[in-house]
Image (cartoon, rainbow, N blue to C red):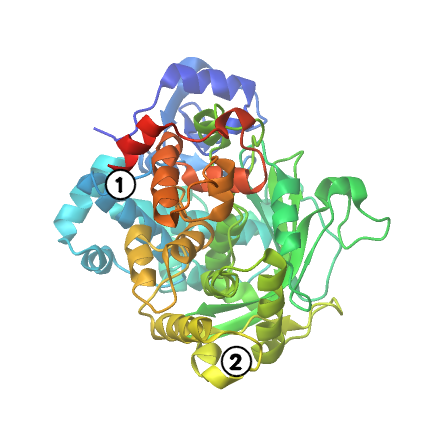
Amino acid sequence: MLSHPIDSDACYLALKSRDARFDGQFFTGVTSTGIYCRPVCRVKAPKRENCQFYAHAAQAESAGFRPCLRCRPELAPLRNEPVWSTEDASKMLASQAVKLLGDAALAGDDSSVAQIAAQVGVSERHLRRIVEAHLGVSPLQYLQTRRLLAAKALLTDTQLPIADVALSSGFGSLRRFNAAFSEHYGMPPTRLRKQGSEPRITMPQEHGSIQIQLGFRPPYDADALMSFWRERQLDTMEFIAPCAESMPASSHFSSKNESRGLIRSLCVAHQGRWLSGWLRCSLDLEKNLLRVRMSEAFAPALPLLTQRLRAAFDLDADPAAVDAALHSSFDAGDGMRVPGSLDGFEIAVRAILGQQVTVAAGRTFTQRVLQTFGEPIQTPWPQITRCFPTPQILAQATPESFGALGIVKQRQAALIAISRAVASGELNLNSPPNPLRVIEQLQEHPGIGEWTANYIAMRALRWPDAFPAGDIALHNALGLRDEKSPTKRAKLAEAASQAWRPWRSYAVFRIWAGLHRSSNHSQFDSCSRNKYLG
């Protein structure tokens, strides 16, 4: 039995209303056409008796349906899976396996199911049994679907050569790619280049660039996300657009509707080498799309970069589930996302330099590190001239070089330790399959405590239930400022946060935005203190 059964009647009602809040939560296979669609597809709704509903695209393809060329299932946000915990070993294993399968599909390598089983420490047979129970398809079918949909997106949105599309999507050869594509979709890959899909919405051309688009579920509080990033913006590396209402007449973005976005440089490790380039991202809140243009240097790593972009903008969030869980504690915040990252190592460095100082001070220290160790880069924008330093570069830095920037010894040690761990591959900070284990690993390094590890977990590891219980702003919002013991404050905050599980990361960002209800500011009474503190 599947871990998330589908309510067919509810799905059909959502399909008829084209409700974007259900995008990616299910797919509709239409038996009369052999096509499967997203709930937001603009074609005439099929008859109820012709509809079959699936939780994942892989299930629809396994049943013999082909992806719609109009609504493009490859653009849909990923389904919101239940957050696993250590109390459910089967769900934890399935979640890790699905994450690794998705990574293998997007990393452009040819990882096998046997290799993935070895990574999670089980036999290939047991992995197959767990994944089939969780997803309704075999690991190989899920992996194949993710690769084919990634290839379909590249074929439709880019002009990359077919051979490059095949390799970028994880197929070992062009022959294997052509065979799989023709078998699953009933046509050769070249036909997509000839007929395409809906007319593309173009963006102003920049020389030597690639354009992609990614979907998300509304509502989306873009201004809150951009405000958070703008407050931490690093000069020479990134530019965060103003909100739509204050956008100047002369802008890097094509319209007020797409003005919420960023331009930045980036270095990405891919198959043993570093790719450096630029990205320009803009949120289209009318069509629920993130539109991205990037330099051609990223072409070999497009599926991987797509995953990073989805994480950075929190595109796969299910705002309906999050808002319902947090509504009783917050006056506002519907559609708020957790600001993610395109580079987990960068977030770790920012977190270390932001320990026990103001946001402005943390930004100043990080700016110094960027200017001292960052690599120069050429971009179409004169204000974007540097890439954030790679872990290999900072791993070779000396304590004295950090000390010259005003960074204290404890943070010097933490920066060097984390840089070496990431550079060696010991630590994975880009959405790993087991974030709880990575939180433990982080705290094993010098200078990395509970607050820093959980901050990294929220933004880099994409763990929705992270909670920095020792955060002073959380204590103030919860009315704990008069409690003298930091340990007791943290325990009380941890106890209060149980009502927000499994979305505590989202609650933290709402508190930092000042949205916590005043009615909840009163301190715990003595009975509550005794209950929670023993």
Could you say where residue 184 lies in the image, as x and y percent from the top left?
A: 37, 44
* Secondary element at tag 1: loop
> Is 183 left, or right, of 518 in this rendering?
left
Can I make out residue 337 in this image?
no
Query: Image point 48% across, 50% down: which residue?
Result: 311
Could you say where residue 290 lies in the image, as x and y percent from the top left?
A: 61, 45
Foreground of the two, 311 or 272: 311
- Total marks drawn? 2
Could you say where residue 285 lies in the image, as x and y percent from the top left?
A: 65, 36
Report which residue position mark 1 lands on. 85
Report which residue position mark 2 lands on. 403
Instruction: Give the image quarter of residue 480.
Output: top left
Q: Earlier in the sequence, mark 2 or mark 1?
A: 1
Foreground of the two, 94 or 485: 485
Foreground of the two, 123 or 487: 487
Can I make out residue 225 in this image?
yes
Mark 2 or mark 1, which is nearer to you?
2
Query: Image point 19% across, 59% down: which residue?
Result: 118
For badge 2, the amino acid type reads Gly
Neighbours of disc 1 within 10 Å: few (<14), some (14-19), many (20+)? some
Could you say where residue 508 lies in the image, as x and y percent from the top left?
A: 48, 41
Instruction: Give the image quarter of residue 464.
Output: top left
Q: How far apart are marks 2 and 1 (CA)?
A: 41 Å
Q: In which quarter of the image is the N terminus?
A: top left
The label on residue 249 is none
For badge 1, the amino acid type reads Ser
Q: Is residue 125 above or below residue 445?
A: above
Q: In this view, does 151 lie above or below 283?
A: below
* Secondary element at tag 2: helix
Query: Image point 46% across, 31% down: which residue?
Result: 322
Neighbours of disc 2 within 10 Å: few (<14), some (14-19), many (20+)? few
Q: Quadrant of the C terminus?
A: top left
